[in-house]
Image (spheres, rainbow, N blue to C red):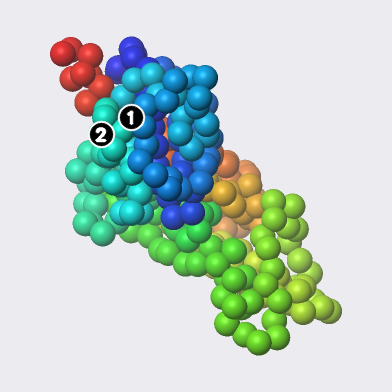
């Protein structure tokens, strides 16, 4: 396992940039920033910012936003990570690299088989079996997208904001806002429970992980349910994709170290 060298990882998601600073295989810190609006350049430590940090080594990145790639590749020591770099079998060409990295991180952190529920702009489920082979998954609109669709697509319904402290609402609401929250959140929780139960019936020893911006909120909506197959709270690991990036870049970093 590679141990030496400082480097920065970057995953360009649909809504934000997700950064990670490593020393070899040791994760030092993570942070998020807005999408780039100009080419990424070398910054001295004194002039760094969250969206244009000081990078004291190689930049390894993965992106699901093509418009961000040109800005990132302007950095003189940037290396793009693609599905070809992910050591998971049976990946299909259109699979999002962010989903693949999170799944790889889950397998590393919790072992195979593994199921990842990523509460990002889109809410995704991605699973692999005990041989680290992709089984498949599902994609549905994230919480905020569901709220936005009702607010923007109707004349009278308000647009809700999914805040970090958004509780599980009463099922039978007595306000318009409450009814929207009830419909979206109870339906979402019910769907996720069905997916988890089905997966755990097929793979009882599978690890489960929640990640993404809504990961903590999803954990509150998915309490332990022994009768469905999980008897402990589902762990929230915000850095799953960063750990996946660490594994996917190992061969590149080993080659660079030998050179």
Q: Element at badge 2? A: strand
Closer to the camera, 57 or 228? 57
Name the spot of residue 171 as percent of width and height, x first.
75, 73
Left or right: where does residue 205 sit relative to residue 155? left
Closer to the camera, 31 or 39? 39
Q: Which residue is mark 1?
A: 59
Name the spot of residue 245 as percent of width and height, x first.
35, 35
Closer to the camera, 216 or 90? 216
Residue 185 appears in the rendering: yes
Q: Residue at x 67, y 60 (%)?
A: 162
The reply to whether dot 1 and dot 2 touch (C-beta < 8 Å) is yes
The picture quadrant where one finds residue 79 is: top left
Q: Element at badge 1? A: strand
Measure the C-alpha gap from mark 1 to mark 2: 6 Å
Left or right: where does residue 45 sit relative to residue 231? left
Name the spot of residue 45 as percent of width and height, x first.
48, 19
Using the image, determine if residue 72 lies above or below residue 97.
above
Left or right: where does residue 137 sit relative to residue 46? left
Residue 79 is marked as 2
């Amino acid at each position: 396992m590679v141990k030496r060298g400082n480097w920065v990882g970057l995953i360009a998601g649909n809504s934000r940039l997700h950064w990670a600073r490593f020393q070899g295989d040791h994760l030092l810190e993570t942070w998020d920033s807005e999408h780039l609006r100009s080419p990424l350049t070398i910054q001295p430590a004194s002039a760094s910012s969250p969206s244009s940090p000081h990078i004291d080594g190689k930049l390894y990145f993965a992106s699901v936003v093509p418009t961000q790639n040109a800005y990132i590749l302007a950095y003189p020591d940037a290396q793009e990570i693609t599905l070809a770099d992910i050591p998971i079998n049976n990946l299909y060409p259109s699979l999002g690299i962010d989903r693949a990295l999170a799944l790889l991180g889950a397998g590393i952190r919790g072992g195979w088989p593994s199921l990842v529920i990523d509460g990002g702009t889109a809410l995704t489920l991605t699973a692999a079996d005990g041989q680290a082979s992709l089984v498949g998954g599902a994609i549905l609109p994230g919480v905020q997208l569901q709220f936005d669709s009702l607010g923007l697509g109707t004349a009278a319904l308000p647009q809700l904001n999914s805040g970090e402290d958004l509780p599980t609402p009463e099922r039978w609401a007595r306000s318009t806002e409450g009814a929207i929250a009830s419909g979206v959140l109870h339906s979402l929780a019910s769907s996720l429970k069905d997916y988890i139960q089905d997966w755990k019936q097929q793979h009882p020893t599978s690890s489960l992980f929640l990640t993404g911006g809504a990961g903590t909120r999803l954990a509150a909506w998915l309490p332990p349910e022994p009768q469905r197959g999980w008897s402990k709270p589902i762990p929230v690991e915000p850095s799953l994709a960063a750990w996946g990036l660490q594994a996917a870049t190992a061969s590149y970093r080993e080659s660079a170290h030998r050179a």
